Each structure stands twice: as C-alpha cells, then as structure tokens.
C-alpha cells in the first residue's frame, strides 16, 4: 500500500500513527495534521451509468433498468438526482423493449412488419443489443 498524501496540505511525508475504529491513522510531518484514509467503495463502470440514464430518459422504470443492467434501482435513482435528469412526460406512448444477440437482431430487422407502426431505437448493451419501441396507446 502506498502512503497517502495529507488532505490538508498535500504533504507527502506522512507517518503511521495508530489505528482508530479499525482504520489506519496517519500524521503529516509538515502540518502535524492527523487523518485516516477514506475507504474506496465499489465503483460502477461509467458505461452502466450512461446506459441507465439513457434507459430512464426513454421511459423505462427504475425496476426494469435494474433487471436489464443488474444495477440497483436505488443507484439509478441516485444518478438521476445527481445528474438532474428529467424524463420526458409523454403519456401517449409506452416503451417496450427486447434484448437480442447479433444474429437475432439481423433476423428481427429483416422482417418488415417489425419496422412499421412504431418508433424504434437500437442500442448496444454489452455484447447484446436492445431494441426500444414506442407504441401509441389506443383510445377505446
């Protein structure tokens, strides 16, 4: 483990100075400041953050995003708040989605019936592809 820098003065000369709450404590030799190193939490790849926000903007619910990406719906909610994302409020359409591999995608696109009567977005999702379609609600 490499020695940390002082968070107060960015000093490089620090020494160990005991353990507090199960965490190593350090002392800066330059400014005599005592500190502990913050634990680095598990960080999610930015790819999944961007995909989750894209799916949210497309109108997919937090729980559905959790099922698709395998990322907690609470994390998705926190990212939406953090980046101040607003989902468009258009209640005349509802999104449906399919997850396909490359071969299934080419067969899907070869069928002309799948390309009519709805807007469609195709996005990469790891080694697979996701098709999001918007279908108009039918007034009864």
Image: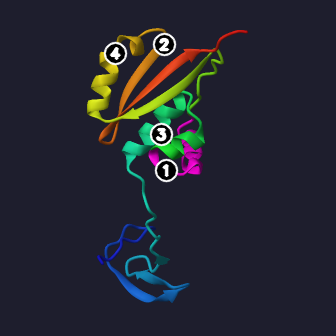
What kind of element bears circle 3? Answer: helix
What kind of element bears circle 1? Answer: loop
Q: Nearer the viewer, mark 3 or mark 2?
A: 2
Disc 3 to disc 1: CB gap under 8 Å:
yes
- Alpha carbons under labels 1 and 2: distance apart: 28 Å
User: Which mark sits nearer the N-terminus, 3 or 2?
Assistant: 3
Is residue 73 placed above or below 42 in the rendered structure?
A: above
What kind of element bears circle 2? Answer: loop
User: Which mark sits nearer the N-terminus, 4 or 2?
Assistant: 4
Q: Quadrant of residue 17?
A: bottom left
Picture disc at residue 52: 3
- Alpha carbons under labels 3 and 2: distance apart: 23 Å
User: Which mark sits nearer the N-terminus, 3 or 1?
Assistant: 3
Picture disc at residue 111: 4
Name the residue located 38 percent from the left edge and 77 percent from the top edge. Answer: 30
Q: Nearer the viewer, residue 84 or 76?
A: 76
- Alpha carbons under labels 3 and 1: distance apart: 8 Å
Picture disc at residue 118: 2
Disc 4 to disc 2: CB gap under 8 Å:
no
Residue 116 in view, yes or no? yes
Q: Which residues are magenta?
A: 69-84
Residue that protrudes farthest toward the right in the picture: 140
Picture disc at residue 71: 1
Q: Quadrant of residue 37?
A: bottom left
């Amino acid at each position: 483990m490499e020695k940390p820098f002082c968070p107060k003065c960015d000093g490089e000369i620090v020494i160990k100075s005991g353990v507090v709450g199960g965490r190593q404590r350090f002392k800066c030799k330059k400014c005599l400041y005592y500190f502990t190193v913050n634990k680095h939490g598990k960080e999610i790849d930015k790819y999944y953050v961007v995909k989750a926000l894209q799916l949210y903007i497309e109108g997919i619910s937090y729980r559905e995003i959790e099922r698709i990406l395998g990322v907690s719906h609470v994390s998705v909610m926190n990212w939406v708040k953090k980046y101040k994302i607003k989902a468009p409020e258009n209640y005349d359409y509802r999104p449906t989605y399919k997850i396909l591999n490359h071969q299934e995608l080419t067969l899907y696109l070869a069928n002309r019936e799948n390309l009519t009567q709805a807007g469609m977005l195709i996005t990469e999702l790891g080694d697979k592809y996701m098709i999001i379609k918007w279908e108009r609600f039918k007034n009864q």
